[in-house]
Image: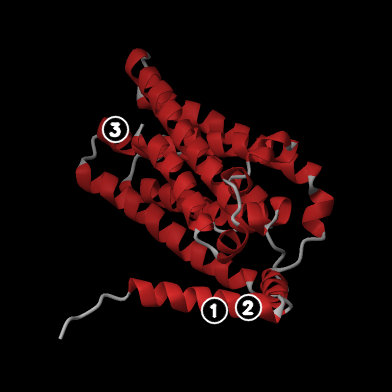
Protein backbone atom coordinates (compact mmCIF):
# COMPACT_ATOMS: atom_id res chain seq x y z
CA UNK A 1 0.00 0.00 0.00
CA UNK A 2 2.87 2.35 0.80
CA UNK A 3 4.36 1.72 -2.65
CA UNK A 4 1.02 2.47 -4.31
CA UNK A 5 0.71 5.83 -2.59
CA UNK A 6 4.39 6.66 -3.21
CA UNK A 7 3.78 6.10 -6.93
CA UNK A 8 0.78 8.44 -6.85
CA UNK A 9 2.82 11.02 -4.95
CA UNK A 10 5.55 10.78 -7.57
CA UNK A 11 3.01 11.54 -10.30
CA UNK A 12 1.72 14.70 -8.66
CA UNK A 13 5.18 15.87 -7.58
CA UNK A 14 6.32 15.58 -11.19
CA UNK A 15 3.28 17.60 -12.24
CA UNK A 16 4.06 20.26 -9.65
CA UNK A 17 7.64 20.46 -10.93
CA UNK A 18 6.28 20.93 -14.45
CA UNK A 19 4.07 23.78 -13.20
CA UNK A 20 7.19 25.55 -11.94
CA UNK A 21 9.07 25.01 -15.18
CA UNK A 22 9.76 27.75 -17.69
CA UNK A 23 7.06 26.69 -20.11
CA UNK A 24 4.36 26.53 -17.45
CA UNK A 25 5.30 29.97 -16.07
CA UNK A 26 5.28 31.66 -19.45
CA UNK A 27 2.12 30.17 -20.90
CA UNK A 28 0.11 29.28 -17.77
CA UNK A 29 -0.65 25.72 -18.82
CA UNK A 30 -3.74 24.15 -17.25
CA UNK A 31 -3.31 20.91 -15.23
CA UNK A 32 -4.91 18.87 -18.02
CA UNK A 33 -1.99 19.77 -20.30
CA UNK A 34 0.66 19.09 -17.66
CA UNK A 35 -0.58 15.62 -16.62
CA UNK A 36 -1.05 13.85 -19.95
CA UNK A 37 -4.18 11.77 -19.30
CA UNK A 38 -4.60 11.38 -23.07
CA UNK A 39 -1.78 8.83 -22.95
CA UNK A 40 -4.31 6.23 -21.82
CA UNK A 41 -5.92 6.37 -25.27
CA UNK A 42 -2.81 4.96 -26.94
CA UNK A 43 -2.54 1.15 -27.20
CA UNK A 44 1.25 1.30 -26.80
CA UNK A 45 0.90 3.16 -23.51
CA UNK A 46 -1.55 0.53 -22.27
CA UNK A 47 1.03 -2.14 -23.08
CA UNK A 48 3.69 -0.19 -21.16
CA UNK A 49 1.39 0.09 -18.13
CA UNK A 50 0.54 -3.63 -18.29
CA UNK A 51 4.25 -4.45 -18.46
CA UNK A 52 4.83 -2.20 -15.42
CA UNK A 53 2.11 -4.00 -13.46
CA UNK A 54 3.57 -7.41 -14.35
CA UNK A 55 7.05 -6.16 -13.42
CA UNK A 56 5.88 -5.10 -9.96
CA UNK A 57 3.97 -8.33 -9.34
CA UNK A 58 6.89 -10.48 -10.47
CA UNK A 59 10.40 -9.21 -9.68
CA UNK A 60 9.58 -6.77 -6.88
CA UNK A 61 7.22 -9.27 -5.23
CA UNK A 62 9.90 -11.96 -5.60
CA UNK A 63 12.26 -9.92 -3.42
CA UNK A 64 9.79 -10.19 -0.54
CA UNK A 65 9.97 -14.00 -0.53
CA UNK A 66 13.75 -14.38 -0.54
CA UNK A 67 14.14 -14.42 3.24
CA UNK A 68 11.45 -17.04 3.79
CA UNK A 69 12.80 -19.17 0.96
CA UNK A 70 16.28 -19.14 2.50
CA UNK A 71 14.82 -19.99 5.92
CA UNK A 72 13.06 -23.04 4.48
CA UNK A 73 16.45 -24.33 3.29
CA UNK A 74 17.94 -24.05 6.75
CA UNK A 75 19.77 -20.75 6.13
CA UNK A 76 19.28 -17.71 8.30
CA UNK A 77 19.52 -13.95 8.04
CA UNK A 78 23.17 -13.79 6.84
CA UNK A 79 22.36 -16.02 3.86
CA UNK A 80 19.42 -13.85 2.82
CA UNK A 81 21.59 -10.75 3.22
CA UNK A 82 24.23 -12.32 0.98
CA UNK A 83 21.61 -12.96 -1.73
CA UNK A 84 20.50 -9.32 -1.57
CA UNK A 85 24.14 -8.26 -1.74
CA UNK A 86 24.67 -10.32 -4.90
CA UNK A 87 21.56 -8.80 -6.45
CA UNK A 88 22.67 -5.30 -5.57
CA UNK A 89 26.15 -5.74 -7.03
CA UNK A 90 24.78 -7.25 -10.24
CA UNK A 91 22.26 -4.42 -10.54
CA UNK A 92 24.87 -1.72 -9.88
CA UNK A 93 27.44 -3.01 -12.37
CA UNK A 94 24.83 -3.53 -15.08
CA UNK A 95 23.41 -0.04 -14.65
CA UNK A 96 26.87 1.47 -14.98
CA UNK A 97 27.70 -0.59 -18.07
CA UNK A 98 24.38 0.07 -19.81
CA UNK A 99 24.53 3.80 -19.02
CA UNK A 100 28.06 4.03 -20.42
CA UNK A 101 27.21 1.93 -23.48
CA UNK A 102 24.16 4.04 -24.32
CA UNK A 103 26.43 7.02 -24.94
CA UNK A 104 28.29 5.10 -27.67
CA UNK A 105 27.06 5.01 -31.24
CA UNK A 106 27.61 1.26 -31.52
CA UNK A 107 25.10 0.47 -28.77
CA UNK A 108 21.49 0.28 -30.06
CA UNK A 109 19.24 2.33 -27.82
CA UNK A 110 16.78 0.32 -25.70
CA UNK A 111 18.25 -2.95 -26.94
CA UNK A 112 18.54 -4.45 -23.46
CA UNK A 113 14.87 -4.15 -22.43
CA UNK A 114 13.39 -7.11 -24.37
CA UNK A 115 16.45 -9.23 -23.59
CA UNK A 116 16.61 -8.44 -19.86
CA UNK A 117 13.13 -9.76 -19.03
CA UNK A 118 13.98 -13.42 -19.75
CA UNK A 119 17.18 -13.04 -17.71
CA UNK A 120 15.56 -12.09 -14.42
CA UNK A 121 12.59 -14.39 -15.12
CA UNK A 122 15.00 -17.32 -15.47
CA UNK A 123 16.69 -16.27 -12.25
CA UNK A 124 13.36 -16.41 -10.41
CA UNK A 125 12.48 -19.77 -11.98
CA UNK A 126 15.66 -21.51 -10.79
CA UNK A 127 16.06 -19.73 -7.45
CA UNK A 128 14.50 -22.63 -5.51
CA UNK A 129 16.86 -25.19 -7.06
CA UNK A 130 20.30 -24.47 -5.49
CA UNK A 131 20.88 -25.71 -1.96
CA UNK A 132 24.21 -23.98 -1.35
CA UNK A 133 24.76 -20.36 -0.43
CA UNK A 134 27.06 -19.79 -3.42
CA UNK A 135 24.41 -21.05 -5.81
CA UNK A 136 21.73 -18.81 -4.31
CA UNK A 137 23.99 -15.76 -4.46
CA UNK A 138 24.90 -16.51 -8.08
CA UNK A 139 21.25 -16.80 -9.08
CA UNK A 140 20.50 -13.58 -7.20
CA UNK A 141 23.30 -11.81 -9.08
CA UNK A 142 21.80 -12.98 -12.39
CA UNK A 143 18.46 -11.49 -11.35
CA UNK A 144 20.20 -8.23 -10.46
CA UNK A 145 21.83 -8.08 -13.88
CA UNK A 146 18.46 -8.53 -15.57
CA UNK A 147 16.86 -5.92 -13.31
CA UNK A 148 19.50 -3.30 -14.11
CA UNK A 149 19.42 -3.97 -17.84
CA UNK A 150 15.63 -3.65 -17.85
CA UNK A 151 15.23 -0.48 -15.80
CA UNK A 152 18.17 1.67 -16.92
CA UNK A 153 17.05 2.46 -20.54
CA UNK A 154 13.34 2.54 -19.73
CA UNK A 155 13.07 6.33 -19.68
CA UNK A 156 14.65 6.54 -23.13
CA UNK A 157 12.05 4.04 -24.33
CA UNK A 158 9.26 6.27 -23.02
CA UNK A 159 10.78 9.31 -24.72
CA UNK A 160 11.01 7.47 -28.04
CA UNK A 161 7.40 6.29 -27.84
CA UNK A 162 5.58 9.27 -26.34
CA UNK A 163 7.93 12.27 -26.48
CA UNK A 164 10.00 14.10 -23.88
CA UNK A 165 7.08 16.36 -22.91
CA UNK A 166 5.11 13.31 -21.72
CA UNK A 167 7.97 11.64 -19.83
CA UNK A 168 6.96 12.90 -16.38
CA UNK A 169 3.36 11.72 -16.79
CA UNK A 170 4.40 8.35 -18.23
CA UNK A 171 6.87 7.77 -15.38
CA UNK A 172 4.29 8.79 -12.80
CA UNK A 173 1.58 6.50 -14.14
CA UNK A 174 4.15 3.71 -14.47
CA UNK A 175 5.20 4.13 -10.83
CA UNK A 176 1.56 3.80 -9.76
CA UNK A 177 1.16 0.58 -11.77
CA UNK A 178 4.42 -0.86 -10.43
CA UNK A 179 3.29 -0.15 -6.87
CA UNK A 180 -0.12 -1.66 -7.50
CA UNK A 181 1.49 -4.73 -9.07
CA UNK A 182 3.82 -5.16 -6.09
CA UNK A 183 0.87 -4.96 -3.71
CA UNK A 184 -1.18 -7.51 -5.68
CA UNK A 185 1.78 -9.83 -6.33
CA UNK A 186 2.85 -9.89 -2.70
CA UNK A 187 -0.73 -10.49 -1.53
CA UNK A 188 -1.44 -13.33 -3.98
CA UNK A 189 2.01 -14.86 -3.55
CA UNK A 190 1.72 -14.75 0.23
CA UNK A 191 -1.68 -16.45 0.08
CA UNK A 192 -0.24 -19.17 -2.17
CA UNK A 193 2.74 -19.69 0.13
CA UNK A 194 0.61 -20.00 3.28
CA UNK A 195 -2.20 -22.16 1.88
CA UNK A 196 -0.35 -24.69 -0.29
CA UNK A 197 1.99 -27.54 0.60
CA UNK A 198 4.79 -26.22 -1.57
CA UNK A 199 5.10 -23.06 0.50
CA UNK A 200 7.40 -20.36 -0.83
CA UNK A 201 8.34 -22.46 -3.88
CA UNK A 202 4.79 -22.11 -5.18
CA UNK A 203 4.87 -18.36 -4.54
CA UNK A 204 8.07 -18.15 -6.59
CA UNK A 205 6.32 -20.03 -9.38
CA UNK A 206 3.61 -17.37 -9.34
CA UNK A 207 6.16 -14.55 -9.58
CA UNK A 208 7.88 -16.44 -12.41
CA UNK A 209 4.58 -16.67 -14.29
CA UNK A 210 4.08 -12.92 -13.93
CA UNK A 211 7.63 -12.40 -15.19
CA UNK A 212 6.82 -14.49 -18.25
CA UNK A 213 3.73 -12.33 -18.78
CA UNK A 214 5.95 -9.25 -18.61
CA UNK A 215 8.23 -10.75 -21.28
CA UNK A 216 5.26 -11.43 -23.57
CA UNK A 217 3.82 -7.92 -23.16
CA UNK A 218 7.24 -6.32 -23.74
CA UNK A 219 7.81 -8.41 -26.86
CA UNK A 220 4.38 -7.41 -28.18
CA UNK A 221 5.19 -3.75 -27.52
CA UNK A 222 8.49 -3.93 -29.40
CA UNK A 223 6.89 -5.77 -32.30
CA UNK A 224 4.16 -3.16 -32.51
CA UNK A 225 6.55 -0.19 -32.37
CA UNK A 226 9.57 -1.73 -34.10
CA UNK A 227 9.64 0.87 -36.87
CA UNK A 228 9.44 3.85 -34.53
CA UNK A 229 12.08 2.39 -32.20
CA UNK A 230 14.39 1.61 -35.11
CA UNK A 231 14.22 5.21 -36.30
CA UNK A 232 14.62 6.72 -32.81
CA UNK A 233 17.72 8.94 -32.49
CA UNK A 234 20.49 8.02 -30.03
CA UNK A 235 20.85 9.69 -26.66
CA UNK A 236 23.41 12.26 -27.79
CA UNK A 237 21.29 13.27 -30.80
CA UNK A 238 18.26 13.74 -28.57
CA UNK A 239 20.22 15.95 -26.18
CA UNK A 240 21.63 17.98 -29.09
CA UNK A 241 18.15 18.48 -30.52
CA UNK A 242 16.82 19.74 -27.20
CA UNK A 243 19.75 22.14 -26.88
CA UNK A 244 19.18 23.40 -30.41
CA UNK A 245 15.50 23.95 -29.65
CA UNK A 246 16.45 26.06 -26.65
CA UNK A 247 18.92 28.12 -28.73
CA UNK A 248 16.35 28.68 -31.46
CA UNK A 249 13.95 30.23 -28.96
CA UNK A 250 13.21 33.94 -29.60
CA UNK A 251 15.55 36.32 -27.84
CA UNK A 252 12.72 38.27 -26.26
CA UNK A 253 11.37 35.13 -24.65
CA UNK A 254 14.80 34.21 -23.29
CA UNK A 255 15.23 37.73 -21.88
CA UNK A 256 11.81 37.44 -20.28
CA UNK A 257 12.79 34.13 -18.71
CA UNK A 258 16.01 35.60 -17.33
CA UNK A 259 14.12 38.56 -15.85
CA UNK A 260 11.60 36.20 -14.24
CA UNK A 261 14.39 34.05 -12.83
CA UNK A 262 16.31 37.00 -11.40
CA UNK A 263 13.11 38.48 -9.97
CA UNK A 264 12.27 35.16 -8.30
CA UNK A 265 15.75 34.84 -6.83
CA UNK A 266 15.63 38.42 -5.55
CA UNK A 267 12.24 37.92 -3.90
CA UNK A 268 13.36 34.65 -2.29
CA UNK A 269 16.54 36.19 -0.77
CA UNK A 270 15.95 36.98 2.95
CA UNK A 271 16.49 40.58 4.02
CA UNK A 272 19.01 41.17 6.81
CA UNK A 273 18.38 44.23 8.96
CA UNK A 274 21.22 46.57 9.95
Labels 3 & 1 near each other (Cβ < 8 A): no
Is 153 situated above or below 176? below
Q: CA distance from mark 3 to mark 1?
A: 57 Å
- Tell me the SS state at disc 2: helix
User: Which badge, 3 or 1, comes first in the chain's sequence?
Assistant: 3
Judging depth in this view, the residue of 185 and 209 nearest the camera is 185
- Circle 1 packing at 10 Å, graded few (<14), some (14-19), many (20+), is few
Labels 2 & 1 near each other (Cβ < 8 A): yes
Q: Specify the label residue 92 is tagged with.
A: none
Q: Is residue 33 left or right of residue 120?
A: right
Judging depth in this view, the residue of 31 and 216 nearest the camera is 31
Rendered-image quadrant of the C terminus: bottom left
Q: Residue at horizontal 34%, vertical 50%?
A: 84
Q: Is residue 271 left or right of residue 105?
A: left
Judging depth in this view, the residue of 34 and 130 nearest the camera is 34
- Residue lying farthest to the right in this orientation: 227
- Tell me the SS state at disc 3: helix
- Circle 2 packing at 10 Å, graded few (<14), some (14-19), many (20+), is some
Q: CA distance from mark 2 to mark 1?
A: 6 Å
Residue 241 position within the rendered picture, expressed as x and y whole percent measured from the top left:
73, 73
Rendered-image quadrant of the N terminus: top left
Is 39 situated above or below 248? above
Residue marked by disc 1: 258
Residue marked by disc 2: 254
Q: Specify the label residue 68 is tagged with.
A: 3
Amino acid sequence: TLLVYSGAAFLFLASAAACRSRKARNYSLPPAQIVKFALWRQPSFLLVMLASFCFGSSLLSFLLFIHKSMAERGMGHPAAAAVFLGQGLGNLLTRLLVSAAQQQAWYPLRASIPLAGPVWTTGMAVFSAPRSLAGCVSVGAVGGVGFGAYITPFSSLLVALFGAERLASANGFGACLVGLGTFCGATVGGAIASRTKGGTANALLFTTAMGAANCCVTALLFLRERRRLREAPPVEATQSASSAAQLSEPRGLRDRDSRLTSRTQTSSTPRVSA
